[in-house]
Image: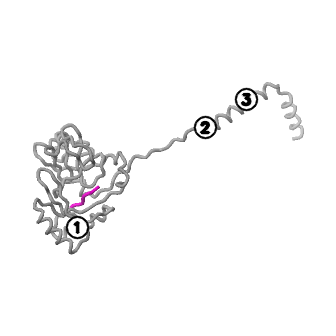
Amino acid sequence: MRGWGRKTQGIVASLPIWYYSRVRQLALVIFAVLFLSACGPKKVQVNAPPLPRVSSSELEGLASYYAEPYHGRRTASGEIFDSYREMTAAHRTLPFNTIVRVTNKNNGREVDVRVNDRGPFRDGRVIDLSLRAAREIDLVRTGTAPVKLKILKGAAALPPSGASRPVYAVQVGAFENPRAAEELKQQLAKKYPDVTVQSFSGQKTVYRVRIGRESDIQTANRLASRLRKQDFQPFVVRVN
């Protein structure tokens, strides 16, 4: 081993000067590469918006469509409703800008729409389509059709500050007569807190009786279940 050590020392001593220069240059290059890679921009993983959670009753039922007199008016999201050119829809609970695939169960035709409004406010209906979207699945001729919804993409844009948390209510009835709405409100107020009557203007003014302002959709669904046992026909709506 001692002889081997003397041999290696002799070999190292006999190496030319340019060899050490090359080794030094290579070491500097490696150091520079490692330094720059450490200082370079980090890749930031951007996650897609999570798909919203909704009950199965909100994903299957009847679809309808709407055009006049709502065309040109502001939707619940603040956008102007363009029933003839835009592939949009109204849903009671899905966040605005959610992308949904609507399949007509009668003929298998599909259309992808973006939620930008609230509705439909009739029991058994799960989605209201723009006229253009309704034509894609041959819905205009029949007016309504059984459909199945599939959520393709969560909300593409963040809601404005102050409205980031969803708020849900349970709609129990809708009346053209404000006195009838007030009577139902008084009846419900004996058992439930936070009962309100809200007016909505379309072709006619409709007075909708709603209960609660829940931040959790499951809580709102449980309230709706209790009301069904009392022979009401309630459904959950998102109010913001």
The range drawn in magenta is: 235-240
**Percent x, y for residue 23?**
75, 30
Considering only order in the chain, which callout, 1 or 2, is on the residue closer to the N terminus?
Answer: 2
Q: Secondary structure at mark 3?
A: helix
Q: Is residue 35 left or right of residue 152?
A: right
The amino acid type found where label 1 is placed reads Val
Viewer-nearest of discs 2 and 1: 1
Q: Secondary structure at mark 1?
A: strand
Q: Quadrant of the N terminus?
A: top right
Magenta span contains residue 237: yes
Per the model, the C-alpha gap separating discs 3 and 2 is: 19 Å
Q: Secondary structure at mark 2?
A: helix
Considering only order in the chain, which callout, 1 or 3, is on the residue closer to the N terminus?
Answer: 3
Q: Which residue is mark 2?
A: 37
Q: Which residue is mark 3?
A: 25
Label 3 CA crowd tier, 10 Å (few <14, some 14–19, many 20+): few
Residue placed at 36% from the left, 54% from the top? 164
Magenta stretch secondary structure, dominant: strand
Considering only order in the chain, which callout, 2 or 3, is on the residue closer to the N terminus?
Answer: 3
**Percent x, y for residue 69?**
13, 45
Instruction: Examine the rendered structure and indicate whether residue 54 appears above or below residue 89.
Output: below
The amino acid type found where label 3 is placed reads Gln
Q: Which mark is residue 195?
A: 1
Residue placed at 40% from the left, 46% from the top? 48
Q: Is residue 163 left or right of residue 126?
A: right
Magenta span contains residue 72: no
Per the model, the C-alpha gap separating discs 2 and 1 is: 61 Å
**Percent x, y for residue 110?**
22, 42
